[in-house]
Image (cartoon, rainbow, N blue to C red):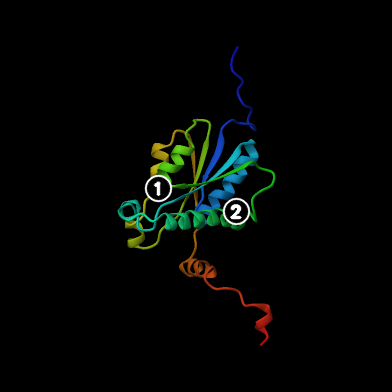
Amino acid sequence: MAPHEPSGDERTGKVVVGVSDSLAGLAALRRGIQEARATGRTLVAVRAWEPPEGETLYLRQPEPSWARLWADDARRRLERAFDLAAGGPPADLRIVRRVVRGSAGPVLCSIAASPDDLLVIGMARPRGPFARLHRRPVHRFVPARAECEVLVVAGPRLLPREARILRRSDLVAPPDRATAGR
C-alpha cells in the first residue's frame, strides 16, 4: 500500500518565514501568510538577531542585560512586522514565533530542516557600494544550503526619494492632535 500523498491544497511540513524590517522582509511575511493559508500549514515566523558589534566582540566582555535587551527588541520587531505586513497576526492561522540568536542564514536553515517545509525569505536590494560590501546575503546562503523548497521574494522597487521618505516615516512622530492647534 502506498503512503498517503497530500493533495494539492493540503501539505505536510511548515512555512518558515525569515522576518526582517526591510520592505522585502515584509513582502516575504505577506507571502508566507498566503502560502500557509493556501496549504493549511503552520506559519513559523523567525527573527534572527546578533549583538550589534558581532558575537566575537560580545564574547570578549559578555553582558547578559544587553543580550536580554537585544532579544526583547527582536521580539518587538517581530510583532511589529505582523502589524506592518498584515495589520496584525492572522487569526485563521497557526503561528509559531521564534526569536533566535544567531546569523539569519544558518538559523533559518536549521528551523526549516524537513524536506516538506517551505522557507520564505525576502531579497532586499542594498543601495551603494558600502551596503553591498558589508552585508551577509541571506538570499544567497539559504538556497545553497537549505534542505527544503525555498521561495525568495523580491522587495518592491522604489525611487531613491521614495525610499528616503519611507525610512524617515518611522523616525518622525505624527503631531499630537491636542497640541496641533496651539
Quadrant of the image containing the C terminus: bottom right
Residue occupying image coordinates x 46% and y 56%: 70
Rendered residue at 53%/31% (across/down): 116
Which of 113/29 is in front? 113
- Disc 1 marks which amino acid? Ser
Q: Quadrant of residue 93?
A: top right
Q: Residue lying farthest bottom?
A: 182
Name the residue located 49 percent from the left edge and 62 percent from the top edge.
158
Callout 2 amino acid: Phe
Q: Position of residue 112 (x, y in %)?
A: 49, 37
* Quarter of the picture holding the N terminus: top right
Is residue 65 depicted above or below 4 in this figure?
Answer: below
Apparent side of residue 42 relative to residue 109 in the rendered image (left or right): right
Task: Kindly state the secondary structure of the residue where label 2 is placed.
Answer: helix
Q: Name the residue tied to disc 2.
A: 82
Q: Is residue 15 visible in this depiction of the protein? A: yes
- Residue 44 position, x and y percent, is 56, 42
- Check disc 1 and report the residue beneath it: 103
Q: Along the horizontal axis of the image, is 26 left or right of 181?
A: left
Residue 78, image x, y percentages: 54, 53
Q: Kindly indicate whether the residue at mark 2 contacts the one at mark 1 (C-beta within 8 angstroms).
A: no
Q: CA distance from mark 1 to mark 2?
A: 21 Å
Q: Residues within 10 Å of mark 1 (few under 14, many from 20)?
A: some
Q: Look at the picture and state if 130 lies above or below 107.
A: below
- Residue in front for this viewpoint, 79 or 65: 65
**Secondary element type, mark 1:** loop
**Can see residue 156?**
no
Front residue (pair 139, 57):
57
- The residue under the point 50% across, 67% down is 167
Give the mark nearest the N terminus, 1 or 2. Answer: 2
